[in-house]
Amino acid sequence: MDQFLQLTLSGLTNGAVLALAALGFVLIYKASDVINFAQGEFLLVGAYVMFAVVGELGWHWTVGIVVTVLVAVALGMLLERFVLRPMIGEPIISLIMVTIGLSSLLKAVVSGIWGTDERAFPSFIPSDPINVFGATVTTDKLWAIAIAAVFLVAFNLFFRRSSSGIAMRAVADDQQAALSMGISVKKVFAMAWSISAATAAIGGIIIANILGVSGNISGVGLQVFPVVILGGLDSIPGAVLGGVIIGLLQAYTGGYVGHGLNSIIPFIVLVLILMVKPYGLFGQEIIERV
């Protein structure tokens, strides 16, 4: 029972981070139909910016979070304006190749500035062991789940209640109709990329606080694809549920089975869901009549 609780909390922690990254992925896809292969590098940038501000400059962690989010937002807007916007109307394979190129570029920039050695992250989330129903867990995992949950709830309220969020939903449903209502589609695209980068940066900070700072953080981005395919490429609730499911599956297979199965179980789920329900659990089925 103790092991089950520990694995569950570890899985929920990983799932919460995956959900944050998947949320940004879904936003970009819903708003602009772009599949962003650089999502993992947004996590990497967020982790290293936080490390630079808090660990190298010695600023308070609250300032570090604000600076990291602002840098992520600026990065997302710049990439959308100068890299993705000129590609509007180009074949989808061209957009995919551009995001793959962005992935390599961002990783190279981070490596060029901070190197490739693993760094100790200036931990600001308490990591004291506590007893939960007889299982010993560290508080940083509980904090990680809580922080991710707060952000996910906040973004859900943003999309449902704010005028900007409603505009984003309108563009995602029908760009031409949104244009006719006076909504700036270009502004919505920029907003989608900036929010995507910000959510990924928060996820990168959470991962770095638990595991340390290294280039391996960007590898989490690969696990986002099974998450969004499972939940549905265009579904925000699906991104959250998919993250939780994948995180728990990884924790349980790693704890009870081992043999490296936890690293491939997300992609096994990816193949199975594509075979059985290719639009995901909550994805919108699109029927084209020809």
Image (cartoon, rainbow, N blue to C red):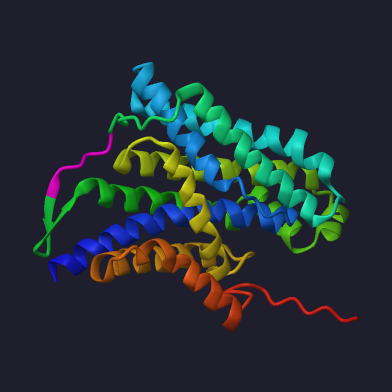
Is 133 on the left-hand or right-hand side of 192?
A: left
Which corner quadrant of the image does residue 271 belong to? bottom right
What is the x, y in percent for residue 273? 55, 77
Which corner quadrant of the image does residue 60 belong to? top left
Q: Please tell me which residue is depicted at 75% across the width and 76% down the height of the picture.
A: 286
| Quadrant location, the N terminus | bottom left
Asked whether 125 falls inside the magenta stretch, the response is yes
Magenta residues, start to end: 124-129
Is 190 on the left-hand or right-hand side of 143?
A: right
| Secondary structure character of the magenta stretch overall | loop
Asked whether 235 falls inside the magenta stretch, the response is no
What is the x, y in percent for residue 221? 51, 51
Work out whether residue 37 or residue 34 is closer to the camera in this orientation and state it: 37
Outermost residue, front direction?
A: 259
From the viewer's perspective, is residue 97 above or below residue 226?
Answer: above
Is 276 on the left-hand or right-hand side of 183?
A: left
Q: Please tell me which residue is depicted at 74% across the width and 53% down the height of the picture.
A: 32
From the viewer's perspective, is residue 289 above or below residue 62?
Answer: below
Work out whether residue 69 or residue 44 is closer to the camera in this orientation and state it: 44
Outermost residue, right direction?
A: 290
Which corner quadrant of the image does residue 180 belong to? bottom right
Q: Please tell me which residue is depicted at 36% across the width and 32% down the height of the picture.
A: 118
What is the x, y in percent for residue 106? 59, 34
| Quadrant location, the C terminus | bottom right
